[in-house]
Image (cartoon, rainbow, N blue to C red):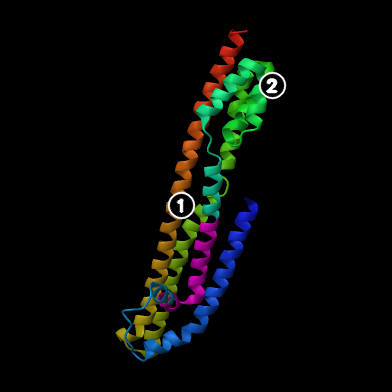
């Protein structure tokens, strides 16, 4: 999984570098078209339109917003894959543990849990390892290790949240920079002319829109990850209670 996210980050960085270099080469052409007053072709592809708007917003500054999107998506996709792999069929696992307890005792149940992937099986293993100390110690062990597994599930979410916060801030910073450029143009010309401030205002609006779009996209992925984690935590809690009930039943049947 670590190799996967490294490859994704590398691909994102390469894409970012290639895109920014392409935009830098095409920036002069797009600027020249704007200066000539040429009309935008209605048949332009979506990619071409996005590229032109990216350049118009200032590719040097918009690259920072794009970097937030690429890195945020890489981490979000890695988290989604990890969380989906962590999902366990708890009913099937509990049935296998119950069968192992009846046939081979605690040691057999440990082997079943060790051979099963996922946080629920890991919690079961930790609880069964304390079975010799009593059911109360099993409960304490499950609670303690459950917190550890929850921390592992939430790993990386703080970075997604960071990019969600930074992207709009970068956009608003571009807004301020664009407005400063507009007022500088007015001061230099000593005249309030809409044509003088149009470029600065356009840069301001495009950077703001770019930052907000990145934040919205990453927020959707973030909310999915949080929802998935909540579902896994509920599974762990319900399965842990069921495991304790199985152990109590197993002790009483001896």
Q: Residue at x 52, y 79 (%)?
A: 22
Vertical comparison of 253 with 60: above or below: above
Give the residue pinned by disc 2.
Answer: 107
Specify whether residue 67 is painted magenta.
Answer: yes
Question: Hey, which residue is sitting farthest bottom in the picture?
Answer: 36
Specify whether residue 232 is painted magenta.
Answer: no
Q: Residue at x 48, y 46 (%)?
A: 225
Mark on residue 221? 1
- State whether residue 222 appears in this view: yes
Residue 134 locus on image (x, y percent) = 65, 15
Q: Which element type, helix, strand or loop, lies under badge 1?
A: helix
Q: CA distance from mark 2 to mark 1?
A: 41 Å
In the image shown, does 143 or 48 lie closer to the viewer? 48
Q: Which residues are magenta?
A: 52-74
Residue 190 locus on image (x, y percent) = 35, 89
Lower position in the chain sequence, tag 2 or tag 1: 2
């Amino acid at each position: 999984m670590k190799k996967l996210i490294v490859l994704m980050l590398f691909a994102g960085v390469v894409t970012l570098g290639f895109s920014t270099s392409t935009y830098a080469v095409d920036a002069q052409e797009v600027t020249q078209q704007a200066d000539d007053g040429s009309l935008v072709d209605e048949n332009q592809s979506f990619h071409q339109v996005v590229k032109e708007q990216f350049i118009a917003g200032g590719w040097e500054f918009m690259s920072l917003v794009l970097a937030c999107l690429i890195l945020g998506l890489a981490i979000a996709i890695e988290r989604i894959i990890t969380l989906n792999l962590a999902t366990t069929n708890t009913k099937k696992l509990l049935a296998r543990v119950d069968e192992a307890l009846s046939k081979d005792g605690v040691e057999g149940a440990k082997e079943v849990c060790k051979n099963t992937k996922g946080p629920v099986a890991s919690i079961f293993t930790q609880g069964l390892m304390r079975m010799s100390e009593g059911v109360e110690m099993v409960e304490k062990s499950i609670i303690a290790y459950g917190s550890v597994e929850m921390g592992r599930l939430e790993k990386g979410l703080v970075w997604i949240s960071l990019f969600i916060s930074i992207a709009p801030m970068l956009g608003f910073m571009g807004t301020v920079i664009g407005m400063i450029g507009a007022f500088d143009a007015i001061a230099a010309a000593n005249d309030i002319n809409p044509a003088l401030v149009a470029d600065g205002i356009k840069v301001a609006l495009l950077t703001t829109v770019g930052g907000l779009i990145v934040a919205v996209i990453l927020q959707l992925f973030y909310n999915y990850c949080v929802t998935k984690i909540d579902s896994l935590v509920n599974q762990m809690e319900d399965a842990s209670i069921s495991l304790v009930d199985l152990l109590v039943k197993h002790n009483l049947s001896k």
